[in-house]
Image (spheres, helix red, strand yellow):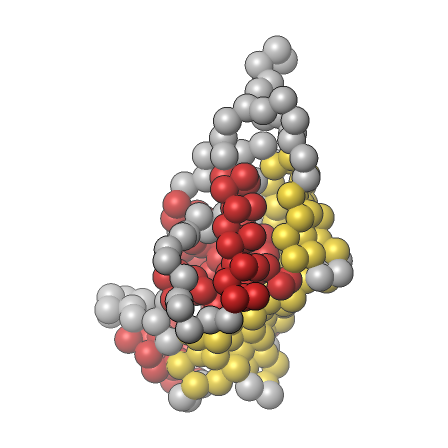
Amino acid sequence: MVHPSSKRATIGAALSTLVLVVSGVTSAPSATLDPATLAASKSMEAKLQILQSNQPSATYPAVIITEREANSYLKVHSGEFLPPGVSAPSVSVQPEHAVASGDVNFDTLSRSYPNPNDWGPKVLAAMFKGTQRVTLTAKIQSEDSGFRVQIESIVVGSMTVPNWLVDYFVQNVLQPRYKIDLTKPLPYPDHVTRIVLGSGQTTFLRGPKVGPPGKGQ
């Protein structure tokens, strides 16, 4: 099974529909949200339960998560797993790509790293002031051993962050905080065999676990 820290890490890495599926976070929804948003969030939660199950089954129907469900889930639950200083998240899905946006207060985000050796957030806070809209585009590639998340671009306000700073952010902020290595495939949830990103939705293909001959589940 995917370790909880890896689940949260994936969310931080892409803030995409894929990420939400492995987050495993649930709580009471806010009463201030409209019924349609709450219903879509509940639909997402039900699909999360299916994807998180490690029990063998006679059949493994595919699970499809829409942008509507993912964004509704974010409205209800994002405060539970996003770091301080990050708010108003949204995601969109395209073939092989996920785009995530959110308002980031870089000063607050920097203060959420009390370790004086965590220079990454301090460097970002020195470069970007106040609260700005941040948009991250990631390429998602599904492989036999898992799925790769490659961050292709980050835009802060109206500025496209240079590649060297994107690499710095991944290596010194993202990976240390969430204890992941984006140079390697991230593990699928149990019984997920492939992830297909399409226009406005993500499809999780499922099947028995793949193991040594005669030991599939």
Q: Quadrant of residue 185?
A: top right
Residue 36: x %, y % from top left: 57, 66
Residue 43: x %, y % from top left: 56, 52
Outermost residue to the front: 35
Query: Can residue 216 be seen by looking at this rendering?
Result: yes
**Which residue is pictured at 40% across the width and 68% down the height?**
31
* For residue 210, above or below residue 130: above
Residue 161: x %, y % from top left: 57, 78
Query: Can residue 161 be seen by looking at this rendering?
Result: no
* For residue 158, above or below residue 140: below
Outermost residue to the top: 214
Of the 4 image quadrants, the one containing the C terminus is: top right
Residue toward you, 187 or 199? 199
Please state if 104 lies on the left or on the right of 108 as rendered.
right
**Which residue is pictured at 46% across the width and 51% down the height?**
23
Please state if 91 lies on the left or on the right of 74 as rendered.
right
**Which residue is pictured at 50% across the width and 27% down the height?**
55
* For residue 35, above or below residue 102: above
**Which residue is pictured at 60% across the width and 88% down the height?**
158
